[in-house]
Structure formats: structure tokens, C-alpha cells
Image (cartoon, rainbow, N blue to C red):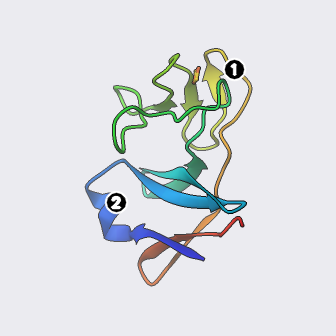
């Protein structure tokens, strides 16, 4: 298991990007905290395979209701990563399993 952050780190931000290793390749994931629930996804848009964000730790739309890809504006439901608007409508972000232990958030290694 790999540490993402201390839970207290999520008190200041809605989203937090972290490094992820997948098949021995470094990539990125991100965590979203909404109403005391935490979800995590790989930072890769299903439309063109690029990172979703242009700014560090900024993944939500202006009102904080959806995850938004900054390249073509696709909107994804926070709770399940499903695209509900945009060029990849019906596709989904890749979820990353996380769990909390001793007030710290971890994810599985995917190597
Ligand atoms: S790359 Fe994300 S909507 Fe096109």
C-alpha cells in the first residue's frame, strides 16, 4: 500500500493529486473529498488520454458539482467518475481503490 496523504491534508482542499505507479510507470491520480466521502481516480481523461487538470489540485467545475476536464470541458460525476456531458459521454474515469488507516489515506499499488 502507498500513502496518499494525511486526512487532515484534505481539510484545506477539495482535490489532491498524487503520484501513482502503474506497471512500473509513474502516472498521476487524484482524490476528491465531498461531504466526508473520498473517491480517487487516475488523472486521465477517457476522451484523449490526457491529464484532466491544468492547475495543481484543480479538478472540479466552478461550482464544485462535477469533475471537469479542462481540455474539452467533459463533466464527470464525482461519486462514480461517469461522464455525463462532453465528447466522452457515457465513459468513465478509472477508479483507484483507497482506504483509511490511522487517519491516513492509502491506495493500492497497481504494479
Ligand atoms: S480530453 Fe478531456 S474532454 Fe477532451
Residue name at image x 72 percent, y 60 percent: 23
Residue name at image x 56 percent, y 21 percent: 74
Circles 2 and 1: CB atoms closer than 8 Å: no
Location of residue 25 in the rendering, given as x and y in whole percent from the top left corner: 64, 57
Q: In this view, does 98 lie above or below 69?
A: below
Location of residue 78 in the rendering, given as x and y in whole percent from the top left corner: 54, 40
Q: In this view, does 73 lie above or below 42?
A: above
Residue on which disc 1 sits:
89
Around disc 2, counting alpha carbons within 10 Å, would you say few (fewer than 14), some (14 to 19), or many (20 or more)? some
Residue name at image x 56 percent, y 59 percent: 20
| Distance (Cα) linking label 2 and label 1 | 29 Å
Location of residue 24 in the rendering, given as x and y in whole percent from the top left corner: 68, 63
Quarter holding the C terminus? Answer: bottom right
42 left or right of 3? right
Residue name at image x 68 percent, y 21 percent: 88
Which circle marks residue 10 in the picture? 2
| Mark 2 / mark 1, whichever is N-terminal | 2
Label 1, secondary structure: give it: loop
Around disc 1, counting alpha carbons within 10 Å, would you say few (fewer than 14), some (14 to 19), or many (20 or more)? some
108 left or right of 2? right
Amino acid at each position: 500500500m502507498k500513502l496518499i496523504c494525511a486526512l487532515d491534508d484534505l481539510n484545506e482542499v477539495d482535490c489532491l493529486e498524487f503520484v501513482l505507479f502503474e506497471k512500473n510507470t509513474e502516472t498521476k491520480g487524484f482524490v476528491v473529498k465531498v461531504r466526508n466521502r473520498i473517491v480517487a481516480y487516475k488523472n486521465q481523461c477517457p476522451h484523449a488520454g490526457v491529464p484532466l487538470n491544468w492547475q495543481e489540485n484543480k479538478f472540479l467545475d466552478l461550482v464544485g458539482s462535477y469533475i471537469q476536464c479542462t481540455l474539452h470541458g467533459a463533466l464527470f460525476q464525482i461519486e462514480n467518475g461517469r461522464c455525463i456531458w462532453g465528447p466522452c459521454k457515457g465513459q468513465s474515469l478509472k477508479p483507484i481503490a483507497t482506504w483509511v488507516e490511522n487517519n491516513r489515506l492509502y491506495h493500492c499499488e497497481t504494479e
